[in-house]
């Protein structure tokens, strides 16, 4: 039942997105790569990012969210939110400027400030594996033509 | 103050079909539980979908936009482990059939996978090679071999399909050759190999994975083997006969009138239990059995064929000593008169 509701909500949001694209002054794109460690014949290890042709549990993923102001005016209070796919465990961002939610997007904060309630009533510090949503709150106005990208990493559960 | 944050939960796993809708809902339920470890990982065929959203303010007011949805499919990891689940050596005996050895085959990959089974009875480093009778799959999952209930495995016909993180019990049924002796051991091994394919870790099979993705060989090489041992327990018996003579003059000469006491000591060696030991001895020609002189372990036995263990039928004595553990002896005595 929960799944059905989620599907309906997703359908609604996707429909809304397709309508919004035509009129939006900002472009937002999402991409994903797989991080592979390649060991050379001399034992040196090189980390490369490749398009995800093959992904199995334990693989490291790199998500890249790009934004660009394609309008002639400045946008303010620019906030990017990325719900973590359920099959992915959060493994940090490149800039460390994000705030996160560990409860499905209800409450937000820096990961180090969040605590998880345990069964015995005590709390423990939140871990990366607890993260359900990531959010960047860009405090500076996004002027016309400005662009950037936000990067976070995850591991396939 | 305007509402700056506009957060909408959205699903990230899109069911591909009715079948996978069920799987997806299971995985959602599992991952939403804290501390619910799923060792095999995300199910093969699951789509990982990522969508970012942004909110910002313009002169016209707050705007919310969505990114494209990027989707990657989780491929099937082929992994398996096999272990022996017998608590120790399985005891057998010379010529015994239907030795049952138990093994557990665990799918440690992330997709439903069929596994081919191969048992080997001729392994080096042991004392004998049993004959393979059957490989049997524990169809009712009770961990006990139920002849006629559990399913006989036939290669290429009924490879068992095991769900991720699940295991099955497999029985290897063998017979022991007649020529083995006490303490002989035999190594019986079984290999389970993913039907989709095996090989070095990282080997991939395009589009062969569950859910439409690829299949990738995991750290186990997608095959695993385990050994179990049969141990022979056998007993042997030796019979030692001695005679003690008491002549009418208090001496020990075999003269007429002398009484000869025969003592038969059966010694059981080896391991286990010797069943139904019967000691018989004909009365020597020219001597006369002394009535009511028969004993077993110093306990008197009647001469009649009746409830007790011994009898004399006119020509021989016979004592049924029953089941005798290895390492023990049974002593029978009787007396004859030299006429």
Image: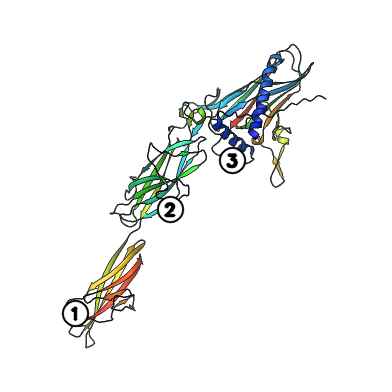
Who is closer to the viewer here, B140 or A87? B140
Q: Quadrant of the N terminus of chain B?
A: top right
Q: CA distance from mark 1 to mark 2?
A: 54 Å
Q: Is residue B302 above or below residue B12?
A: below
Residues packed near mark 1 inside 10 Å, few (<14), some (14 to 19) or many (20 plus): some
Q: Position of residue B21 (x, y in %)?
A: 57, 32
Instruction: Tell me the chain of label 1.
Output: B
Instruction: Tell me the chain of label 2.
Output: B
Q: CA distance from mark 1 to mark 3?
A: 84 Å
- Foreground mark, 3 or 2? 3
Residue under circle 3? B37
Please state if B302 lies on the left or on the right of A10 as rendered.
Answer: left
Instruction: Same chain for labels 1 and 3? Say yes or no.
Output: yes
Who is closer to the viewer here, B252 or B86? B86
Q: CA distance from mark 3 to mark 2?
A: 31 Å
Residue under circle 1? B287
* Colour treatment of the image: rainbow
Please state if A108 lies on the left or on the right of A153 as rendered.
Answer: right
């Amino acid at each position: 039942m929960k799944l059905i509701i989620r599907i309906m909500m997703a359908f609604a949001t996707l429909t809304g997105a397709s309508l919004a694209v035509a009129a939006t002054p900002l472009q937002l794109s999402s991409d994903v790569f797989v991080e592979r460690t390649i060991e050379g014949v001399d034992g040196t290890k090189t980390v490369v990012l490749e398009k995800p042709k093959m992904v199995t549990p334990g693989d490291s993923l790199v998500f890249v969210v790009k934004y660009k102001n394609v309008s002639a005016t400045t946008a303010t209070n620019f906030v990017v939110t990325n719900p973590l796919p359920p099959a992915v465990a959060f493994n940090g961002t490149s800039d460390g400027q994000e705030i996160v939610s560990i409860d499905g997007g209800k409450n937000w904060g820096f990961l180090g400030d969040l605590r998880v309630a345990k069964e015995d009533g005590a709390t423990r510090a939140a871990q990366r594996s607890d993260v359900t949503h990531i959010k960047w709150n860009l405090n500076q106005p996004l002027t016309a033509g400005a662009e950037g990208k936000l990067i976070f990493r995850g591991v396939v559960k | 103050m305007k509402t700056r944050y506009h957060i909408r939960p959205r699903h990230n796993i899109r069911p591909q079909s009715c079948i996978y809708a069920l799987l997806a809902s299971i995985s959602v339920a599992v991952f939403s539980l804290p501390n619910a470890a799923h060792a095999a990982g995300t199910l093969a065929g699951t789509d990982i979908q990522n969508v970012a959203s942004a909110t910002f303010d313009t002169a016209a007011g707050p705007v919310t936009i969505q990114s494209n949805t990027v989707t990657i499919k989780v491929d099937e990891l082929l992994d398996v482990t096999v272990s022996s689940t017998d608590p120790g050596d399985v005891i057998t005996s010379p010529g015994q059939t239907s030795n049952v050895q138990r093994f557990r085959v665990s799918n440690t990959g992330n997709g439903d996978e069929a596994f081919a089974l191969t048992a080997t009875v001729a392994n080096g480093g042991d004392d004998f090679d049993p004959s393979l009778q059957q490989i049997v799959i524990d169809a009712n999952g009770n961990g006990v071999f139920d002849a006629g209930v559990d399913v006989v495995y036939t290669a290429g016909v009924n490879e068992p399909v095991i769900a991720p993180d699940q295991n099955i019990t497999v029985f290897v049924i063998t017979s022991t050759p007649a020529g083995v002796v006490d303490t002989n051991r035999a190594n019986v091994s079984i290999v389970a190999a993913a039907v989709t394919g095996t090989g070095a870790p990282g080997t991939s099979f395009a589009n062969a994975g569950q859910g439409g993705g690829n299949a990738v060989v995991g750290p186990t090489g997608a095959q695993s083997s385990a050994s179990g041992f049969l141990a022979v327990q056998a007993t042997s018996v030796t019979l030692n006969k001695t005679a003690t003579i008491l002549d009418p003059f208090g001496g020990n000469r075999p003269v007429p009138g002398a009484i000869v006491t025969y003592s038969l000591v059966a010694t059981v060696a080896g391991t286990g239990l010797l069943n139904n030991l019967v000691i018989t001895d004909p009365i020597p020609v020219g001597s006369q059995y002394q009535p009511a002189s028969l004993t077993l372990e110093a306990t008197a036995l009647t001469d009649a064929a009746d409830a007790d263990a011994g009898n004399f039928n006119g020509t021989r004595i016979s004592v049924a000593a029953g089941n005798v553990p290895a390492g023990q002896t049974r002593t029978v005595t009787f007396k004859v008169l030299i006429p």
